[in-house]
Image (tube, helix red, strand yellow):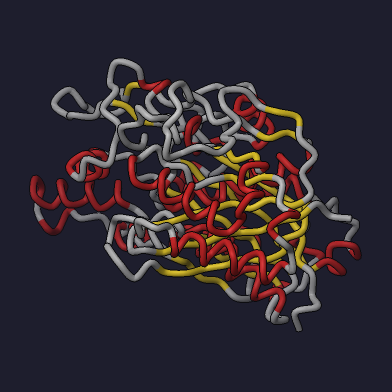
Amino acid sequence: MNHRRVVITGMGAITPLGCSVETFWERLINAESGAHSITTFDVSHYDVRFGAQCLDFKPEDYIDRREIKRLDRFAQMAVAAARGCIRDAGWDSDREDPTRVGAVIGSGIGGLLEIEEQHVRMLEKGVDKVSAFTIPKLMANAASGNVSILVNAQGPSSTVVTACASSAHAMGDAMMMIQNGDADAMFTGGSEAALTPLGLAAFAAMKALSTRNDDPAHASRPFDRDRDGFVMGEGAAVLLFEELEHAHRRGAKIYAEVAGVGASSDAGHITQPAEDGRGAALAMTAALRKANVTPSEVNYINAHGTSTVLNDVTETLAIKKVFGEHAKRLAISSTKSAIGHLLGASGAVELVATVLAIRNGVAPPTINYQTPDPQCDLDYVPNQSRDLNIGVALSNSFGFGGHNACVCIRRFE
């Protein structure tokens, strides 16, 4: 049933650059940074004291005050992003067959803040003081469960947990569910809020994070020779994937077509990417094959681009493997330079950026690019956005565990 075409008809986002798709995009293409010193908990004794938080996010703007306490921050953000998506798509649940609507939301970690807070509560106040909401708040599927409740989605509903590839895999699953005839519309994307005392300490212990405490805004520098690790971020994005004829019937606006999703596994090291980029290359090749797109048709890649020493080199190698000489003609940028690494939510927020790049004819920049790295020698759209006619684009997501995913989207015509 793969003749069923899948299009994107709505988007909502909660990001370090703002809590609407419009604000996120405007600040992204204006080369702004969402990284700053952390003030929401005491980081004075941390090696890393900054991140990319969603400071503008106020859950009471989206969720009934009584419900807020029943949701961990990551689920609050997912519900908020879903509300933005519903509004953007002009979606009316009362007019839809709920059994033909589903939700697949990815999260790499789930309710980490709830785990930390309830563990402290248990140690300090006793086992009988642990909240009855603990499990439904911490479970990684709380985001997809609450989004499905919000939109009365009685079709397929699930959660994907593949570290930093979670939301890209979730969107791949959503696409296949529509193609296979299991649903006509899927709310899909990802959410993550792991910028917590334990989350920050744990990633810092891995030596995965930048330590530029004196200059957070310039700390995330993908593909730059002087990069020293990623910047932790948080956020969420929910997109409405819809079968084409269903979208037409309800008069929906169409942003772009989801042409193909590819996935692979490095089957190597649990945290380090394959040095030759083979896993990433396999995912991109699979996405192109499923989309029936040749490498020379691709104009833009939203790179995984973490700003770690290993990722940026291996991703560059992978792009060269897949695209050959055409790699030099590609515009490639890393949204993480501006918003940090949103872990399990990164693929979804970055797909929003990729969709808008196609729709608006603008490639967003890789900010903080100052010193070229001889091993990263492609066009990373340095420091300022660029007008670009984009017909086909890829969005890459690679996660700990060796999980790789690539989403191929094309301009809808």
Q: Is residue 143 above or below residue 24?
A: below
Where does residue 300 sit, x and y in percent of width and height? Answer: 67, 45
Would you say 339 lies left or right of 362 here?
A: left
Would you say 34 lies left or right of 389 here?
A: left
In the image shown, does 333 or 244 lie closer to the viewer? 333
Would you say 139 lies left or right of 167 here?
A: left
| Residue at the extreme bottom | 1
Q: Residue at x 34, y 46 (%)?
A: 310
Give the number of callouts. 0
Locate the C terminus and report the quarter of the image it occupies: bottom right
Q: Residue at x 80, y 51 (%)?
A: 411
In the image shown, does 181 or 222 lie closer to the viewer? 222
Where does residue 295 sit, x and y in percent of width and height? Answer: 68, 58
Would you say 242 lies left or right of 70 here?
A: right
Q: Residue at x 44, y 44 (%)?
A: 342
Q: Residue at x 48, y 47 (%)?
A: 316
Where does residue 332 sit, x and y in percent of width and height? Answer: 59, 40
Q: Is residue 82 above or below residue 99?
A: above
Locate the N terminus and report the quarter of the image it occupies: bottom right
Residue 90 visible, this orientation: no
Where does residue 73 sit, x and y in percent of width and height? Answer: 41, 45
In the image shown, does 128 or 170 lie closer to the viewer? 170
Residue 398 visible, this orientation: yes
Q: Is residue 355 above or below residue 243?
A: above
